[in-house]
Image (cartoon, rainbow, N blue to C red):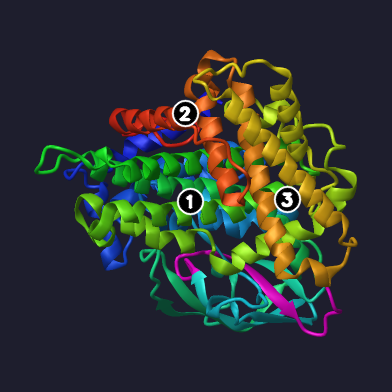
Amino acid sequence: MNTALARIDDLERAFGPLDDPGNPLGAHALLAADAAGSVLPGAEAVLDAFGLNAEFVPADVGGRLERMDVLGRILRPVFRRDASLGFGYGLNCFFATAPVWTAGNEEQRGHAARLLLGGRRVAVARHEVAHGNDFVRDEFTARTVPGGLVLDGSKSAVANASRATGLVVFARMEDAPRGRTHSVLLLDRDELPAGRVEDLARHTTTGMRSTEFGGLRITDCPVPGDAVLGAPGDGYELSLRSSLLIRGLIPSIVLAGADTALRTVARFAVRERADGRSSLDVQHVRSVLTGGFLDLLVIDCLALVATRALHLLPRQMSAYAAAAAYLAPKLVAESMDEMSSVLGEETFAQDGAYGMFQKQRRDLPVTSLGHAGSAGRQVSILPQLPYFARHAWFADPEAPAALFRPDGELPPLDLSQPALLGDGDPLAATLVACTDLLESESGTGGGHGCGPALRFLVRTLTGELVELKKAFEKIPEGDRETLSSPYSFGLADRYTLVLAGAAALGVWREQRDTAAGAFLGTTAWITSLLYRLAGRLGLPLPDRPADCERLVLDEVMARFHNRRSYDLYSSPLA
């Protein structure tokens, strides 16, 4: 773990201070490159020297990927600066190779590893998604011939299409039985016949403008049979299994961008005006800064749970990964709307001291994979909830304490273990356990006068779980029509907020008695955070915990002045 922490710090320092006008990798240069629709070459050189691609390759095939929570943290120094750089250079390679790590044989996994470790890129051309946008409507088809397959078709927008040597292609199989319509192929452009793969025009995007979304056309291209990952027809299942790896990383990358947005607003708020005062004298501004930080903390609690659950709770983690990937972009989008009310006209600045805010706000929808991704995450949660209501909630044992310890050790990652549907909900059981704990104590260990409000909020959140249990017990398991209703989608949204509260409570409980916990061990942040979550749920609220929120604001400003990250780790920034 110490080696991983050193890598994170090394990468942060290699980029230098984001707000230094003289830094060739700072905000000024990044905004200029973004405006030109190009990636900053010096920034890519930093990632080359760091060997970022090795972070996406499992250790058993020569890479550095051993822990998913560490991977999420390593991405943050990059995404705090430029989502186009983080996604286009490397994270898209991990998205592309996730099916290889999940289902590839020894030769396929080795081939993908050699490409990435050799500095090459791998791109993914996904299958058509119902109700998707224009980016995903076209597709590839494959027909079986003696000795292999013949591939045809096109995709109009594939990230890194022309820059990638490796291609992971989801192809519709001709004459395939229902439910087995797609296969996944691992291809190497250098090994395909000349003239069969054509790069098409690049698409211009509103967000992540420096990322290349280009088209690909493949015409009558022979492909060896051993290019198929898993078995023919495994495409849909492989897509779902790959998502279990990918979704836990979404909170980290949106959090990193929002960190920069919040820091930009804090810089605006502390500037001295002509009358000698600052925006911090305004209660609304203080509330926005406090709320923005609390949103980042709850997102990081979800990121922690979703990534560590891959190691600790592989049979139960699917709902947590989907909830984290669904809720994190939603909370950040709402928070950034609030921040824009503080910046005013500077919200639209294209450059200068506040230009990074609009860049991060534009990049967010693309970074988080858009609306179709959000709905898909809810769809993967919903079928599990009637089962949880009948068999898990208020019956399961709680999650292991290690799930909530940011720097705790983990067992090795075994990609054969994660299940598509959970057989229990231990995170919800942690909420119940924390409720019982607080009810049994006369104090809460953190002081600051927040105890009564915290107990009230935790009881209220547990009451919401009771209501969700009643609602989902009425829905027969497998009743797709009811589960696809707007009412059920609303219930799933509420469930994700309850999970967020449970994740935050677990982190607080594990930190409150440790010297290392410091701020995270106090009741100030957890009380303020649960108050904000309960408000989003429309639940009864105690008196506003103003003293707690003042302490949270003090932490916001201390981290701003001391150059520390706005997450669970309070990491040093360059």
* Distance between the alpha carbons at the discs numbered 3 and 1: 19 Å
Query: For the residue marked with disc 1, what is the amino acid?
Result: Val
Where is residue 133? Give x, y as percent: 56, 77
Where are the magenta residues, as a range? Answer: 159-179
Where is residue 494? Give x, y as percent: 67, 53
Mark 3 or mark 2: whose residue is earlier in sequence: 3
Where is residue 571? Give x, y as percent: 42, 30
> What is the quadrant of residue 478 in the picture?
bottom right
Residue 319 disc label: 3
> What is the quadrant of residue 72 in the picture?
top right
Residue 199 disc label: none
Q: Quadrant of the N terminus?
A: top right
Is 90 in front, or is 370? Answer: 370
Is 79 in front, or is 427? Answer: 427
Residue 171 within the magenta-colored segment of the rendering: yes
**To which residue does mark 2 refer?**
548
